[in-house]
């Protein structure tokens, strides 16, 4: 199959598809952080979206869409960034490709468009971590869990307002590793290996 992995610089899913023998390419405005630049299209996804793909797996930016950033929604609506992100998401959803999967965290697309076909977790696919991941599917089946494990550790802390909170440990470590907001977004949006493998095997 000829497969476009849109908005992916890590090549996590692209590599799993290549292992299975598919002609897969990651596509992102950023250079790939993976070790196969020959499998990466560093350009606007809409410049290549009409090139006869059999399937597209897309990871549209969630910064303006995820409910985790709801406190910034008023500003994002005012400056137009949220509407641009919604349009980008929907342009991907309406691409002329027979099989499409769109991935995003829990956010406003459930109401702006429709509810996702399913919500998955890394711990259903062998990674001890919690990260609610929504999938909107066209012409593709829901992913079946492959290896249910523990949900992983959590980091507990007290907020500036004195509220006790907790976050998944993988997320806390990503925040500690990141030196810039861009790095934080990249680490936060990573695709866990178990999910990448399941996408490649079950959707092809």
Image (spheres, rainbow, N blue to C red):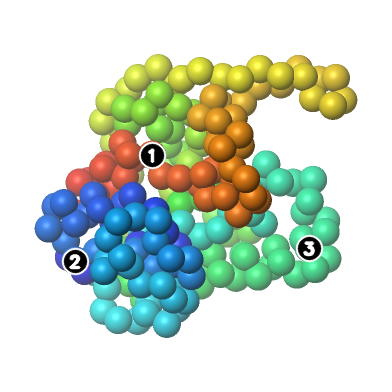
| Residue annotated with mark 1 | 192
Q: Tell me if 96 is positioned left or right of 115 in this view.
A: left
**Label disc, if present, on residue 77 of the rendered structure:** 3
Between 7 and 70, the residue placed more toward the observer is 7
Residue depth check, mark 3 versus mark 2: number of the one nearer the observer: 2
Image quarter for residue 68? top right
Q: Residue at x 83, y 56 (%)?
A: 74
Residue 28, position as x, y percentages in the image: 44, 67
Classify mark 3: residues with Cα within 10 Å, few (<14), some (14-19) or many (20+).
few
Q: Quadrant of residue 46?
A: bottom left
Q: Position of residue 37 (x, y in %)?
A: 31, 65
Callout 2: helix, strand or loop? strand
Question: For mark 2, what is the residue?
Answer: 23
What residue appears at the point 67 percent right and 44 percent down from the top-left corner?
67
Q: Quadrant of the N terminus?
A: bottom left
Q: Residues within 10 Å of mark 2 (few under 14, many from 20)?
A: some
Per the image, label 1 sits on a secondary structure element best described as loop
Q: Quadrant of the C terminus?
A: bottom left
In primary-sequence order, the first of circles 1 and 2 is 2
Residue located 65% across and 51% down the image: 181
Whichever of callouts 3 and 2 sits on the residue coming sooner in the sequence is 2
Badge 1: how crowded within 10 Å, few (<14), some, or many (20+)? some
118 vs 164: above or below: below
Foreground disc of the pair 1, 3 = 1
Tell me the distance, in whole angstroms, between the alpha carbons under discs 3 and 2: 39 Å
Viewer-nearest residue: 143 or 159: 159
The tag on residue 141 is none
Residue 98 is situated, as x and y percent measured from the top left of the image, at: 29, 69
């Amino acid at each position: 199959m000829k497969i476009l992995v849109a908005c992916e610089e890590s090549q996590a899913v692209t590599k799993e598809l290549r292992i299975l023998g598919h002609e897969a390419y990651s596509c992102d405005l950023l250079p790939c952080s993976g070790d196969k630049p020959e499998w990466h299209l560093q350009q606007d996804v809409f410049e290549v979206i009409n090139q006869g793909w059999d399937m597209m797996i897309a990871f549209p930016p969630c910064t303006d869409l995820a409910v985790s950033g709801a406190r910034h929604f008023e500003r994002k609506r005012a400056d137009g960034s949220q509407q641009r992100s919604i349009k980008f998401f929907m342009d991907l959803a309406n691409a002329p490709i027979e099989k499409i999967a769109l991935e995003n965290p829990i956010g406003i697309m459930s109401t702006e468009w429709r509810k996702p076909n399913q919500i998955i977790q890394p711990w259903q696919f062998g990674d001890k971590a919690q990260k609610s991941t929504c999938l909107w599917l066209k012409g593709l089946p829901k992913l079946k869990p492959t290896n249910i494990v523990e949900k992983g550790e959590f980091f507990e802390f007290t907020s500036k307002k004195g509220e006790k909170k907790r976050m998944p440990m993988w997320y806390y470590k990503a925040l500690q590793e990141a030196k810039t907001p861009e790095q934080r977004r990249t680490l936060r949006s990573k695709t866990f290996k178990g999910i990448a493998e399941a996408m490649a095997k079950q959707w092809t």
